[in-house]
Image (cartoon, helix red, strand yellow):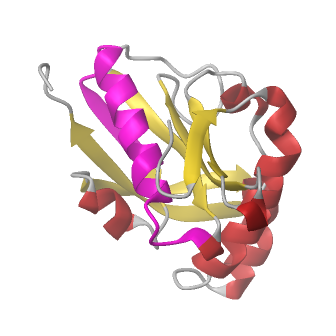
């Protein structure tokens, strides 16, 4: 898919380093508005790694800049899975999808990157028979997800490593059967 200044394509395992670079460029400056520095110092190292399972899922996507200055630079990422985030042995409800590991490069904010990636995820999930999408939104991303129709349904502290918890907002979007 081609959009304004970027193309969306499925991620591949060989994209791991480029996704990690994007996460390292995006998360520290953008998360600073919602979390204390000491929390970010402990949490970000665990969050700024590409997830190999997502890269192989076929439902995790990259926004790739197609302007001359940043040729083939990954400027956004995000996807969805039926499997919830966390330990892999959790039960899977085939009617529920989970929005996973979104990021936009700070230099590409407000250019439609995140919206295009999220729109792709919503459309794919709907086509796959998902009736409800859930996400664990960071404290700074709640407005972004709300703009796509997600509503807050609770709060959750995600355990990223022993002694490292990261507060998030559980958000949900009900998908209609027809469209």
Q: Nearer the viewer, residue 125 or 64?
A: 64
Residue 114 visible within the image: yes
Image quarter in which the C terminus is found: top left
Residue 75, quarter of picture: bottom right
In the depicted structure, whether residue 52 falls above or below residue 169: above
Expressed as whole percent of the image width and height from the top left, the position of residue 85 reads 57, 36
Range of magenta residues: 108-135
Left or right of residue 145: residue 83: right
Q: Residue at x 47, y 22 (%)?
A: 82
Expressed as whole percent of the image width and height from the top left, the position of residue 92 reads 46, 17
Q: Residue at x 27, y 53 (%)?
A: 148
Expressed as whole percent of the image width and height from the top left, the position of residue 27 reads 67, 69
Report if residue 44 lies within the magenta region. no
Q: Nearer the viewer, residue 169 or 71?
A: 71
- Marks counted in the figure total 0
Residue 156 visible within the image: no
Q: Nearer the viewer, residue 142 or 12?
A: 12
Left or right of residue 64: residue 148: left
Q: Which residue is situated farthest in the front direction here? A: 68
Left or right of residue 120: residue 13: right
């Amino acid at each position: 898919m081609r959009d304004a200044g970027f193309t969306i394509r499925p991620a591949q395992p060989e994209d791991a380093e480029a996704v990690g670079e994007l996460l390292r460029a995006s998360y520290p400056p953008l998360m600073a508005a919602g979390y204390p520095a000491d929390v970010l110092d402990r949490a970000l190292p665990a969050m700024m790694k590409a997830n190999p399972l997502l890269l192989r899922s076929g439902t995790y996507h990259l926004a790739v800049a197609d302007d001359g200055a940043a040729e083939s630079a990954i400027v956004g990422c995000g996807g969805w899975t039926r499997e919830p985030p966390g330990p892999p042995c959790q039960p899977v409800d085939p009617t529920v999808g989970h929005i996973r590991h979104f990021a936009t490069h700070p230099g590409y904010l407000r250019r439609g990157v995140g919206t295009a990636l999220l729109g792709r995820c919503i459309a794919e999930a709907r086509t796959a028979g998902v009736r409800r999408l859930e996400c664990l939104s960071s404290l700074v991303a709640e407005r972004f997800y709300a703009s796509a129709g997600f509503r807050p349904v609770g709060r959750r502290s995600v355990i990223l490593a022993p002694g490292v918890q990261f507060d998030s907002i559980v958000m949900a979007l009900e998908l209609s059967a027809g469209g």
